[in-house]
Amino acid sequence: MDELQVECPIHLDAVPLKEILAFNCGHGFCVPCLDALFSSRPSRVSACPTCRKSIRRRDAFQLFLTPIRSMSQMRASSPHLTPYLAPVVDLTTSDEDSPSVLISRLKEKNLALLLEISSLTDDLRRARLAADSQMALQANIENENFRLRRECDDLREENDGLREVNTRIQDQCESLELRCTQGKEISIRLSIDNDRLKEESAKLKAELQKALTAKRQATDETRNERDRVKLFEGRCQTFKKQVYRFHQYVMFSTDCNLHYFVLVRPGKEEAEST
């Protein structure tokens, strides 16, 4: 028996009927296309490519139809069904043909035309369904294309914004690097100045230490000098007293007509004065 071939609305090619799975919406598709359709959806729920209704993979069912048999098969199995599939009926009659035979031939021709009209109607319906599916698929593709274009434009705008932000960040990084370089130079100069100030401070401390030592020496010398001055003043006072006593004694000796001198040792006078 010939295998019945149908057209898959997704890839628009003929496939055996046994490879078609249908859904509750009335549309069917081949197994490879359904596997490709549901492979990218973990929820196993998608939209029908023909009518856009929600479908689930587990709801798919197989169609069991019997294909139309050929003329020889129909004659062999059911001879009374032969007139229904006669494609052409010869209406030329001879003189021996009776009106009943002509009417029978007309009925056969009418039945053949009805079958052909039914077949053409089915073909037209399938063509319309395929065209609707194709139009729906094209509309979906256009909508998806428009959405992708908008996303592409948004991504381009976002990319431009990111480029501007990247440019600003690079400018800020260069500015920070310049500031860091300037800070390092300033730090180096400050370190040099700090070392110089430390050297100067050490020198000042050494000079201050020398000045303090000189001050202490000067203070000691001043104290010693004051002691010597006091000692000299004491000796001067003692000498004045001795001179005064000597003068008094001279005056007294003059008055007494004594012409000799009495010398008093300084040490003895100092002891007496003390």
Image (cartoon, helix red, strand yellow):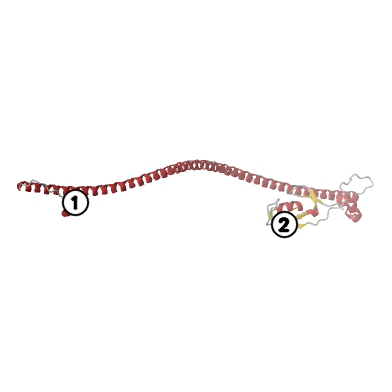
In this rendered view, identify the residue nearer to me: 244 or 82. Answer: 244
Q: Is residue 259 left or right of residue 184?
A: left
Closest to the observer, 178 or 116: 178
Q: Residue at x 72, y 57 (%)?
A: 57
Drawn side of residue 154 relative to residue 204, left or right:
right
Between 165 and 257, which is closer to the camera in this rendering? 257
Q: Nearer the viewer, residue 77 or 100?
A: 77
What is the three-letter code of the residue carrying label 2?
Arg
Q: Determine the secondary structure under disc 1.
A: helix
- The image position of residue 261, as x and y in percent, is 11, 47
Which residue of the protein is positioned furthest toward the bottom in this rendering?
58
Residue 22 lies left or right of residue 148; in this view the side is: right
Q: Residue at x 24, y 48 (%)?
A: 228
Q: How many discs mark residues in the rendered view?
A: 2
Label 2 packing within 10 angstroms: few (<14), some (14-19), many (20+): some
Furthest residue in direction right, as rendered: 96
Q: Picture coordinates of residue 169 (x, y %)?
A: 53, 43
The kind of secondary structure element at disc 2 is: helix
Q: Evaluate if marks 1 and 2 touch, with contact meaning CB atoms under 8 Å apart.
A: no
Disc number for residue 267:
1
Q: Please state if 37 lies on the left or on the right of 211 as rendered.
A: right
Quarter holding the C terminus? Answer: bottom left
Q: Give percent across and percent down for residue 254.
A: 6, 46
Q: Tell me which residue sits at (74%, 51%) in the image.
A: 33
Which is in the foreground here, disc 1 or disc 2? Answer: 1
Q: CA distance from mark 1 to mark 2?
A: 144 Å
**Residue beneath disc 2:** 57
